[in-house]
Image (tube, coloured by chain):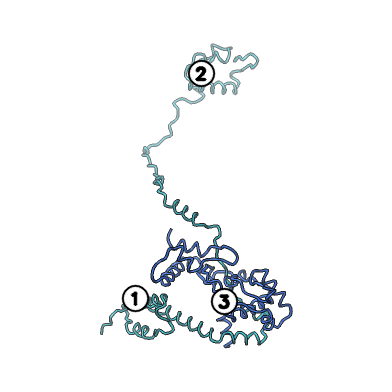
Chain colours: A cyan, B blue
């Protein structure tokens, strides 16, 4: 025997009941929920188990609401008289204090937030932003199979001595005279480094007072 | 900005100690609600906002004393001890409780001081009432010998829950 899946229909009915309760058309205390649960029970199959669970959950929400209403109604019946009777029974301060526990409310307020601020925030959020900067990964270059670190053709000392030999005939002379024949800046810097090394090694000497380089 | 944003702002707004949140009519006016089924639309808005803020540990409440809707932290997530304004002051809490019962049993919400003194059956009730007045919970009319609650207690105390707890206690 096949059982018709009515979970969707039941969900719609539960939604409809909720709407009618909110609009005041029906009172939950007067509404009979048993037929709803009976229908749900009869329509239950292995295939619609998941859907039925959801419907059962929604129906239970209604049932809980009904219990809450019933509880409120019962508590309001002759409550004044009962409360006065309770107070006349001389409860201790601590007993009343304990009664108030779990009934305190922690308020949530946002004093600083204004409608203008919210509007401004919304406008800021809705501003079109430019495309974010794309990060491109560098491509790995091809490496020769026999990779060797390129080194200068001549060793530093050889170059330095070559420079020394080129100026040897001029000595003794001033610092300016040594470089007077060079025009390129790079060559001047290179040769100046050699000169410093030669001075450090003591091959050349420098007399500061007269600005003379000599052997 | 949609209705939910405006509603959130209205219900979390604190004008002063006694006015927090908004009334139903204020909400209708601000949102320009002119539909036939206003009550249904109002519940729809409240339920929707409630669904939005529930995951944040917040809930919507109603203050029966001044008919204002407001937002509070969910009692399950808030520290109940810190929310208690009468920590280590059970005497003052008990006097306030007697005042609430006396005021709410009268239709106009006003109680005579002698009424409270009769129920409380303790000395120094006047001093307690003065302290409660200083804390903003009640107004003391010394000329007429009257006491009435301010809306503050409706914001800080879940009256419905309190009465249900009390009713259950009495039944036991």
Work out how far the residue at label 1 is from the one at label 2, CA to CA, in angstroms.
100 Å
x and y percentages locating residue A66 in the rendered image: 45, 82
Secondary structure state at the residue bearing disc 2: helix
Q: Quadrant of residue A10?
A: bottom left
User: For the point 31% across and 79% down, which residue is it?
Assistant: A6
Report the residue marked by disc 1: A12
Q: Does residue A195 appear to the left or right of B28 in the view shown? A: right
Q: Quadrant of the C terminus of chain A?
A: top right
Instruction: Report the number of numbered marks.
Output: 3
User: For the point 32% across and 81% down, which residue is it?
Assistant: A45
Report the residue marked by disc 3: B159
**Nearer-the-camera pick, A181 or A32:** A32
Question: Is B168 drawn above or below residue B93 in the view shown?
Answer: below
Task: Say if labels 1 and 2 share a chain.
Answer: yes
- Of the residues tagged 1 and 2, which is closer to the observer? 1
Q: Does residue B41 appear to the left or right of B104 in the view shown? A: left
Report the residue marked by disc 2: A163
Crowd tier of the residue under label 2, counting other residues whose Cα lies within 10 Å: few below 14, some 14–19, many 20 or above? some
Crowd tier of the residue under label 1, counting other residues whose Cα lies within 10 Å: few below 14, some 14–19, many 20 or above? few
Crowd tier of the residue under label 3, counting other residues whose Cα lies within 10 Å: few below 14, some 14–19, many 20 or above? some
Question: Do residues under tags 1 and 2 come within 8 Å of each other at their CB atoms?
Answer: no
User: For the point 32% across and 76% down, which residue is it?
Assistant: A8
Name the residue at the left extreme. Answer: A1
Please say whether residue A18 is visible from this viewpoint: yes
Secondary structure state at the residue bearing disc 1: helix
Name the residue at the front extreme. Answer: B143
Q: Does residue B16 appear to the left or right of A68 in the view shown? A: right
Work out how far the residue at label 1 is from the one at label 3, CA to CA, in angstroms.
34 Å
Chain letter of disc 3 in the image: B
Q: Quadrant of residue B159?
A: bottom right
Q: Quadrant of the N terminus of chain A?
A: bottom left
- Of the residues tagged 1 and 3, which is closer to the observer? 3
């Amino acid at each position: 025997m096949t059982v018709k899946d009515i979970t969707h229909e039941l969900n719609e009915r539960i939604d409809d009941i909720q709407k009618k309760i909110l609009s005041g058309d029906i009172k939950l205390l007067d509404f009979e929920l048993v037929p709803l649960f009976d229908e749900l029970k009869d329509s239950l199959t292995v295939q619609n188990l998941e859907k039925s669970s959801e419907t059962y959950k929604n129906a239970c929400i209604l049932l809980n609401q009904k219990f809450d209403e019933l509880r409120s109604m019962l508590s309001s019946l002759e409550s004044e008289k009962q409360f006065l009777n309770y107070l006349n029974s001389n409860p201790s301060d601590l007993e009343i204090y304990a009664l108030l526990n779990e009934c305190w409310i922690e308020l949530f307020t946002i004093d600083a937030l204004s409608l203008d601020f919210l509007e401004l925030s919304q406008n800021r959020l809705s501003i079109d932003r430019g495309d974010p900067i794309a990060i491109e990964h560098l491509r790995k270059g091809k490496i020769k199979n026999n990779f060797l670190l390129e080194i200068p053709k001549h060793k530093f000392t050889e170059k330095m001595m070559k420079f020394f030999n080129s100026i040897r005939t001029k000595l003794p002379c001033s610092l300016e005279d040594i470089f007077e024949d060079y025009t390129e800046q790079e060559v001047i810097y290179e040769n100046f480094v050699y000169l410093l090394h030669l001075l450090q090694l003591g091959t050349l000497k420098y007399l500061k007072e007269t600005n003379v380089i000599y052997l | 900005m949609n209705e939910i944003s405006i509603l959130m702002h209205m219900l979390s707004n604190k004008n002063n100690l006694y006015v927090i949140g908004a009334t139903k009519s204020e909400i209708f006016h601000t949102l320009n609600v002119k539909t036939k089924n206003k009550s249904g639309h109002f519940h729809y808005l409240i339920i929707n906002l409630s669904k939005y803020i529930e995951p944040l540990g917040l809930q919507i409440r109603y203050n029966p004393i001044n008919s204002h809707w407001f937002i509070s932290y969910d009692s399950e997530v808030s520290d109940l001890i810190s929310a208690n304004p009468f920590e280590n002051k059970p005497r003052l809490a008990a006097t306030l409780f007697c005042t609430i019962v006396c005021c709410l049993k009268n239709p106009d919400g006003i109680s005579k001081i002698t009424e409270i003194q009769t129920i409380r059956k303790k000395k120094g009730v006047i001093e307690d009432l003065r302290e409660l007045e200083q804390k903003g919970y009640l107004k003391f009319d010394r000329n007429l010998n009257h006491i009435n609650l301010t809306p503050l207690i409706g914001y800080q105390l879940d009256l419905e829950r309190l009465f249900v707890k009390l009713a259950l206690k009495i039944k036991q």
